[in-house]
Image (spheres, grey):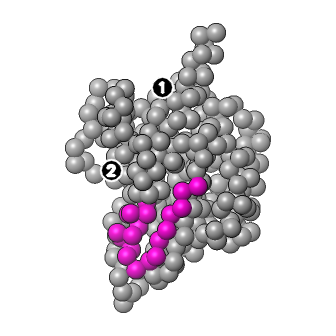
Amino acid sequence: MAATFLHRTIGLLAAAGIWLLSLPGTAPAQGQDCAVPASFYDTEPTLPKTAEAIASGQTVAIVALGSASTLGQAAGSPDLAWPARLAVALRSRFPAARVTVDNRAVAHQTSQEGSHLLDREVIALKPTLVIWETGTTDAVHDTDLDEFRQAIQDGIDRLRTSGVEVVLMDIQFSRWTHAVINFERYESVLREVTNANDVPLFRRHDIMHHWAESGLFDLMTGEKEKLHLVASRLYDCIGQAMADFITRGVHLGAGIPGVSSGSNK
């Protein structure tokens, strides 16, 4: 009975996007750069269509698909969520490119539900790139791994058939919830499917673990207002890291007006 209650409690926190934990007792590092080592990116495929559109100052339409953490619920507003911060980072670095980031996340969404939304809610928008955050809700609900794998594969197939590039984003890092829920099985499936399809995987889990080990964030707080502030900072860092990730293939040609070199790490 106690174990069932704990599992349900963790599930609710995870789905709400407020379960992210860092090193106990640490304080947010004021002014510390939330850089990501290049080793987190080097082995992942690049996005040539997106890179070309950015480099040549074209319209770049990005759609973010996911659940509560993509909505920015822990920060208290979609304007503070990582998709909104991604848009700010890209427009700052590449002002000639007409970048839009449309947040189509739905709280508690499973991979199968996300895949079913693609035709109606995503592909119809004719995006250049879709960033699909998934896996957390499936792990909380103990979704069958074969169903999870097939939903991801179906989504990748439909996006690519429509000429859309895709990035998968994996599960958030948390010491507490990982002790209760077996996220690793879903992480393994994401790695397997993205490797098989040569699709970039944004390793959010490993990146957040790196930030936790460096003492950058304290997400142990139970104070609602402080949690919002820390979550806002986290989402901003995720947005910056995602901007780095998707622009690795950008080769800026001489004479392209209004295009800055950015701050790719």
Q: Identify the residue at image location x=58%, y=55%.
A: 104
Q: CA distance from mark 1 to mark 2?
A: 23 Å
Which residue lies under the disc numbered 1?
Answer: 176
Which residue lies under the disc numbered 2?
Answer: 34
Residue closest to the eye, 227 or 172: 227
Q: What amino acid type should be assigned to the residue bearing mark 1?
A: Trp
| Residue 240 placement, left or right of 50 | left
Q: Identify the residue at image location x=44%, y=57%.
A: 84
Q: What amino acid type should be assigned to the residue bearing mark 2?
A: Cys
Q: Is residue 131 visible?
A: yes
Quadrant hosting residue 196? bottom right
Task: Indicate whether residue 42 is drawn in magenta.
Answer: no
Which corner quadrant holds the C terminus? bottom left
> For mark 1, does the 10 Å Cα neighbourhood hold few (<14), some (14 to 19), or many (20 or more) residues?
few
Q: Which residues are magenta?
A: 86-104
Say if 236 sits above or below 50 in the image. above
Q: Is residue 189 visible?
A: no
Which corner quadrant holds the N terminus? top right
Quadrant hosting residue 184? top right
Where is residue 108 shown, x and y percent of the image? 61, 39
